[in-house]
Image (cartoon, grey):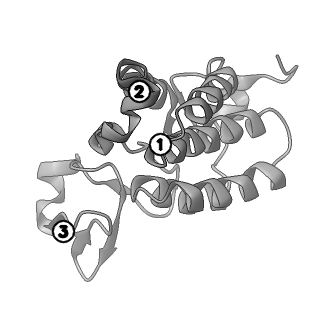
Amino acid sequence: MPSDNRDDTCNAPLHPQTVEGFLLFNAGKYFEAHEALEIAWMEETGSIRDLYRGILQVAVSYLHILRGNYNGALKVHARSRKWLKEWSPVCRGVHVEELMENAEEAFREVKRLGEAGIGQFDAALLKPIRWEEVSHSKKTYLCDRCGSRMQEKNCKVTCPNCGNRFDCSDLNIYFD
């Protein structure tokens, strides 16, 4: 285990590239998410690199599932668990415990299907990453349907992933 204090590490902001990685992950673009998260992992210092490594390996394990690579999926999933297990339930706004539980649910189904049946895997079991950016200048909204970060423009808040949309006047109903 790293010698630095993980609680202090978890209270720092996310590396900017992680947001891109999370958006790609939530759009089901797992290879691209891996690439974006790998940049954050390489540019960071300290133990937070392990969190980013674990998340990017969840993306790779999901990619293996979708490509029908049973053994690769199991192998990378085990690695992701190794890197994620010591983190707080929420770290840098990332719901780590939820991500791990969602991955475990997906892998229970992978194991149930087995190597011969992995092609029948229901991709709906690959849940999005949920996170909140810590920002003092602008509030960030997460889609209540798919978990993606919503974009605000001209008093409209829209999810770029699923199209969920609200007027700014509705925000207190959905996000407060």
Name the residue at 49% across, 26% down.
100
Judge from the rendering whether residue 51 lies leftward or rightward of residue 157; answer left or right.
right
Of 93 and 148, nearer the camera is 148
**Number of the front mark, 1 or 3:** 1
Q: CA distance from mark 2 to mark 1?
A: 10 Å
Q: What label sits on residue 29 in the rendered view?
A: none
Element under disc 2: helix
CB of mark 2 within 8 Å of CB of mark 3? no
Judge from the rendering whether residue 51 lies leftward or rightward of residue 144; answer left or right.
right
Q: Quick one: label 2, few (<14), some, or many (20+) residues within 10 Å?
A: many
Q: Amino acid at mark 2?
A: Val
Whichever of callouts 2 and 3 sits on the residue coming sooner in the sequence is: 2
Residue 88, horizontal then vertical, whole percent: 58, 22
Element under disc 3: helix
Whichever of callouts 2 and 1 sits on the residue coming sooner in the sequence is: 1
Of 97 and 133, nearer the camera is 97
Res. 1 image quadrant: top right
Judge from the rendering whether residue 19 lies leftward or rightward of residue 95; answer left or right.
right
Q: Amino acid at mark 3?
A: Cys
Q: What label sits on residue 168 in the rendered view?
A: 3
Residue 168, horizontal then vertical, whole percent: 18, 68
**Number of the front mark, 2 or 1:** 1
Q: Quick one: label 1, few (<14), some, or many (20+) residues within 10 Å?
A: some
Q: Amino acid at mark 1?
A: Gly
Q: Is residue 131 visible?
A: no
CB of mark 1 within 8 Å of CB of mark 3? no
Residue holding disc 2: 110
Q: CA distance from mark 1 to mark 3?
A: 42 Å
Whichever of callouts 1 and 3 sits on the residue coming sooner in the sequence is: 1
Residue holding disc 1: 68
Name the residue at 11% across, 50% down.
173
